[in-house]
Image: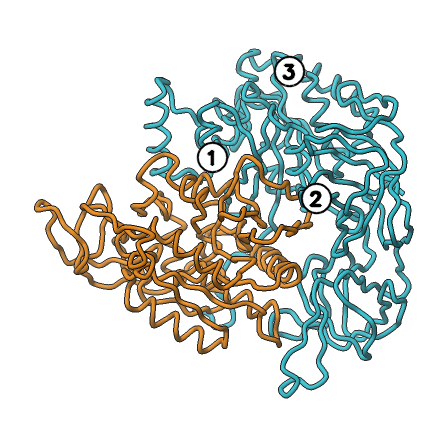
Chain colours: A cyan, B orange
Amino acid sequence: MNNNSHHLSSTMPLLRFTTAGSVDDGKSTLIGRLLFDNKSIFEDQLDAIALASKRRGESQINLSLLTDGLRAEREQGITIDVAYRYFSTPRRKFIIADTPGHFQYTRNMVTGASTAHLALILVDARNGIVEQTIRHTFIASLLGIRHILVCINKMDLVNFEEGVYLKILSSFQKINGRLGLTNVQFIPISALQGDNIVEKSARMPWYTGKTLLETLEETPAENTTSAKGRFPVQYVIRPDQQKFPDFRGYAGRVAGGVFYRNQKVIALPSGMKASIQSVIKGTEELETVPNGSSVTISLDKDIDIGRGSLIVPEKEIPRSASSLQAMICWFSQIPMHPNGKYLLMHVTGTYKCRIEEIFFISDMNTLNEMPGRPLEMNDIGKVRLKLAKPVFFDLYKENRTTGSFILVDETTNATIAAGMIEG
Amino acid sequence: MELLAVPTGHLNELEDEAIYVLREVAAQFERAAILFSGGKDSIVLVHLAMKAFYPALPPFSMLHIDTGHNFQETLEFRDALAQKTGLPLFVRFVEDSIRQGKVKDETGYNASRNVLQTVTLLDAIEELKIDAAIGGGRRDEEKARAKERFFSHRDEFGQWDPRNQRPELWNIFNGRKNPGEHFRVFPISNWTELDVWLYILKEKIPVPSLYFTHRREVFFRDGIWLANAPFMIRKSSETIEIRDVRCRTIGDITCTGLTLSRASTVEEIVREIAASRITERGGRYDDKRSEAAMEDRKREGYF
């Protein structure tokens, strides 16, 4: 064995994708198929669900039992909460955020979509585009998922006809005309029989594109468009001063652009300037670190920086305001209080805020904007928030980390809403 | 050596994510402890914590709940790691909870102190005023764990309410709580068993030799090889055999299943796991008790 390398095959970065749909769309079957074909369902798990299926009097192995993790879910035959599934091919590791189709639909779909690079939208070939398809697509677009993969499933039940596929494709394009998603791909599949999942289907020679797995393996893991440097400070590191005299490090995870030694930076909100003295990852000093890295940065001079501060390159200052316009999704059973005061958690900072104006509520089935009213559970709408002090931010479409926030109810500490900054 | 046919392009990202979570714990809580079991997952957690705060020491202590039925090597490994890292170590004993009359030892062939640990753990959390207990739980381990959050809220009785969890969006973790409540935090939620071993290989992290092949007295029960020990009660049909085995998980001896294996290096373990068709908890006796065994234990405040 070579001393310098472990001969591990270095491959594509992690791909996180979200699946959404009801049981009838064949979602469980599709996930079961992906896990099974990639050897990610183990014998003891199969034995356990075979036994459980039998106990319920079902003749076939019910793959949805694999994804229903909680007792209440199995008892009621519904999925309540987002479940995370893992599988790998020799080329790549995948995380599926499997979101339920009915219960707490918006809340779960939004949660799953918030970290996804790709949304897998299932359409039943017999039914074509239904309201749920529109809702999925709307949420995927709202949460800024860069890649949309529309799988037209159950092609075996429509005799693998190209005409059915083309008709669904064109009606989807009509919806998309209003949403403006750019990276949309379509694949005709049969999850049950395995057509175009791992192997190309011989029964649909008219389809010349990639299989589902090839597409997943090759999709870039992008989630932010901005290359502007963003380093939110999580924590200040102050080691033993005898061993490391004068060392003061700022721990954080790069949320945009790159950071490097000797870079001229500015700390916000203080506005003080400094140069990066060292960038430490683990126990090593590096010259430069890319987006996504958890590192510790030290500066050439002592300036006012703490949790909630943002370190940015001198010429890449973000926006700043104490009034924000944002799309928000309401999660709480308690409706929004007009003029209500909430806590806003944004990157590593927490701010008091007040709802000042409700512009409109989105009708997720028609994509129309309805007149503003206080949001109720699972509503999505556009609001203006007034903050107790200015916040440094980017637009959500520019940067998913510095453009997003959650709202917290100060009395219960519950997370009651998620927001995407629009201006 | 042949190429390992497994992807590794994601290991850096998993490390970045876990370190981010550990730093959120340091920033949002005052008395956080790593729940240390002596197993590979908690060893990896300690390694990640040392990297996350370098050159300072992590602002965490280590807490071990000792069932009294541990492998001797686990205890030695634990003490050596605490000494090497300089992290304060607290050990609390299930034996004490039994003596105080808070729990009763189970009896019979499948008697285990695994469930009893919960009481000792919750007492320790209260006694030491721990507000964040960092665990090595992973979502791929078990179906109830697949629904677990990174920051998992526990009420003042230490209970988990899986139907009423806080949604977790982007990288924003809401650790706000009322006095008496605490959080369980799972920084390696998104890792699989294979990821843990690939990371141990990449970072050259020492692990107890129990993970490697060794010859041991074992007996076979309900499809699982169990280690022979003085407190293990065997049925008359269960005979002791000598086998080459290794631990795939390290827990209480009474419920830790052993794998027949000749893997003697981390690379051999990686290859064995990559080819395995049985999950690591498939060998855990504690999960076989019912379809919802893990969920029930977790609701009560288990690890």
Nearer the viewer's eye, disc 1 or disc 3? 1
In the rendered view, tell whether residue A387 sits above or below residue B57. above
| Chain on which label 1 sits | A
Q: Which residue sits at x=86%, y=71%?
A: A264
For residue B207, what is the image quadrant? bottom left
In the rendered view, tell whether residue B215 sits above or below residue B301. below
SS assignment at label 3 = helix
What amino acid type should be assigned to the residue bearing mark 2? Answer: Thr
The answer to whether marks 1 and 3 sit on the same chain is yes
Q: Position of residue A228 (x, y in %)?
A: 83, 57
Q: Is residue B107 left or right of residue B152?
A: left
In the rendered view, tell whether residue B276 sits above or below residue A51. below
| Chain on which label 2 sits | A
What amino acid type should be assigned to the residue bearing mark 1? Answer: Gly
Q: CA distance from mark 1 to mark 3?
A: 38 Å
| Chain on which label 3 sits | A
Q: Return the disc, 2 or 3, that comes first in the chain's sequence.
A: 3
For residue B28, what is the image quadrant? bottom right
Q: Which residue is mark 2?
A: A411
What amino acid type should be assigned to the residue bearing mark 3? Answer: Glu
Question: Which residue extends farthest bottom?
Answer: A242
Q: Position of residue B168 (x, y in %)?
A: 64, 44
Question: Which residue extends farthest left?
Answer: B236
Within 10 Å of disc 3 (Cα), the crowding (few <14, some 14-19, many 20+) is some
Q: CA distance from mark 2 to mark 3?
A: 56 Å
Q: Which residue is mark 1?
A: A69
SS assignment at label 1 = loop
Q: CA distance from mark 2 to mark 1?
A: 30 Å
Q: Nearer the viewer, residue A66 or B287?
A: B287
Q: Which residue is mark 3?
A: A162
**Does the rendering let one see residue B212?**
yes
